[in-house]
Image (cartoon, rainbow, N blue to C red):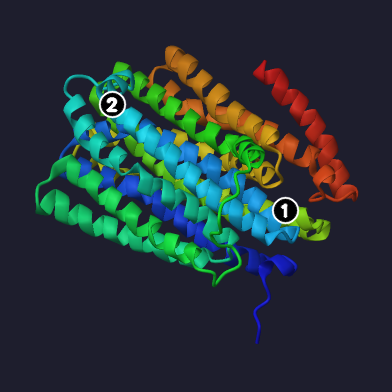
Amino acid sequence: MKTISIYESNPRLFSVLRFTFPTVIMMVFSSMYGIIDGIFLSNFIGSKALSANNIVYPLITVVMAVNLMFATGSNAIIAKKMGEGKQQEANRFLSLVVITAVGVTALLSVIMLAFDTKLYALLGADSELMPYCVSYGTVIIAGSVFFSLQILFQNFLVTAERPGTGMGLTIAAGCVHIGLDLVFIPGLGMGIEGAALASVISMMVAGIPPLFMFAGRSQALHFEKPALKLRTLGFAMANGSSEMVTNLATAVTTMLFNLQMMHLAGEKGVAAISAVLYVESLFISVFLGFSSGAAPLFSYYYGAGKKKRLSALFKISFGFIAVSSAAMFIAAQVLARPIIGAFAGSDAVLQDLALHGLKIFSFSYLLGGISVFGSSLFTALNNGLISALISLVRTLLLRCGALIVFPVLWGIDGVWLAVPVAEVFAALLAGSLIFGLGKKYGYLGAGRLGSGLRRFSKKAVLFSIGKLF
């Protein structure tokens, strides 16, 4: 019996969850790379290694940002072309994007390695942390090309209707990562370099096999001779700019977190914020995974003009975001002590700082999913401008503004409050745009519910803009 493609069937709750679940798992396991390193570094080397890991992280985030820009922006175009029946164009564009993204990543890694100590000092490293930063950063930045491949293929495997393959590779990479951390750090005593090497090898496990999968022709989406479509490539970069903005802003906010905590609580403060940010990356990965998994469906249905399917998919997606937001907030509150204990070990000062912080910080999980979903939705619909606006306001203007002002008013509690307060206003803006533009794109019908939500969104966006300015 021939299996019906999800692109050609009406979206149902179970089918959408089954399609997006592998991407959620991929994102969760990807975020666990850093978390695993953090736990091993903190428990086997010390809080200085954990702090150094967080200082290097913004540079890794830049690599992630660039590749997510290529992956999400081009993925929307590829899925839309598939929906329009232009399969060969989709295949050739896939090849062009992979070549370009890997080349840009290689150039970035060379620049970062050339100016590593200056960059680490700018990001908050002092004389004690600098050797740790150099040891960790040199290895992991040198392997960033494999990180590029992993990010690209995590997205393209979903569009190729092989999310299960991506999930399997990511789980395998995670298992390899854990095993090598055990071997390299406590086993061989390689220290922080061992953690970085374990990360790079695990990226190879997830990034290299899909090269051979897409090189074959057993699936509709595969490599073909690339056509130099600079205008389309430029549009893909612009369309994916919101994801780049989000991750670049994450690099900036991580730097601000580090600088503020170094000033207010020293190296222990940096270690505490590192632990809380690791937890955030794990929880937010659920929103990112679902939104990324659903994005090709939104793009395909939009390209094919299937408005009823768009509407059904939107309802399922928004319901998932609402339920998972509440679940993650409750989990963070209930499990805060064992979660932080995994990072802090026997360090009572670090544990108290991080535990208090997570209790406050976790309120951001209640609303953070709205902005993440909204940004991904508009990227999928090829509206990079709205997507970038949501990301820019949420991650750069609101978070950075709060991180600069709140610590002056409330000290360390101001650092912890910055993100939850920023998420409130980001959700207002994102929700307003999502429901305000629903009729235009066809995912929100013209019925009584849709009209009511649009009227509400107009009032909400005026309120949110007024609060911002």
Q: Amino acid at mark 2?
A: Ala
Question: Image height check: is 158 above or below 434?
Answer: below
Q: Which mark's residue is nearer the viewer, 2 or 1?
A: 2
Q: Are marks 2 and 1 in contact (CB under 8 Å)?
A: no
Left or right: residue 29 compared with residue 300: left
Q: Position of residue 234 (x, y in %)?
A: 62, 36
Q: State which quarter of the image contains the C terminus.
A: top right
- Residue furthest to the top in view is 408
Question: Image height check: is 238 above or below 398?
Answer: below
Question: Image height check: is 425 above or below 450?
Answer: above
Residue at left offset 12%, top offset 45% = 190
Q: Amino acid at mark 1?
A: Phe
Q: State which quarter of the image contains the N terminus.
A: bottom right
* SS of the residue under disc 2: helix
Kindly identify which numbered label has been placed on residue 114: 2
Q: Is residue 171 visible?
A: yes
Q: Residues within 10 Å of mark 1 (few under 14, many from 20)?
A: many
- Residue furthest to the bottom in view is 1
Q: Position of residue 159 (x, y in %)?
A: 59, 59
> How far is the residue under mark 2 from the one under mark 1?
46 Å
Left or right: residue 389 compared with residue 33: right
* SS of the residue under disc 1: helix
Kindly identify which numbered label has been placed on residue 131: none
Query: Which of the two labelled residues, at mark 2 and mark 1, occupies the earlier sequence position?
Result: 2
Residue 21, located in which quarter of the rendered image?
bottom right
Q: Is residue 338 visible?
A: no
Residue indicated by mark 1: 314
Q: Residues within 10 Å of mark 2 (few under 14, many from 20)?
A: few
Residue at left offset 29%, top offset 49% = 200
Q: Position of residue 227 (x, y in %)?
A: 60, 49
- Residue furthest to the left in view is 188
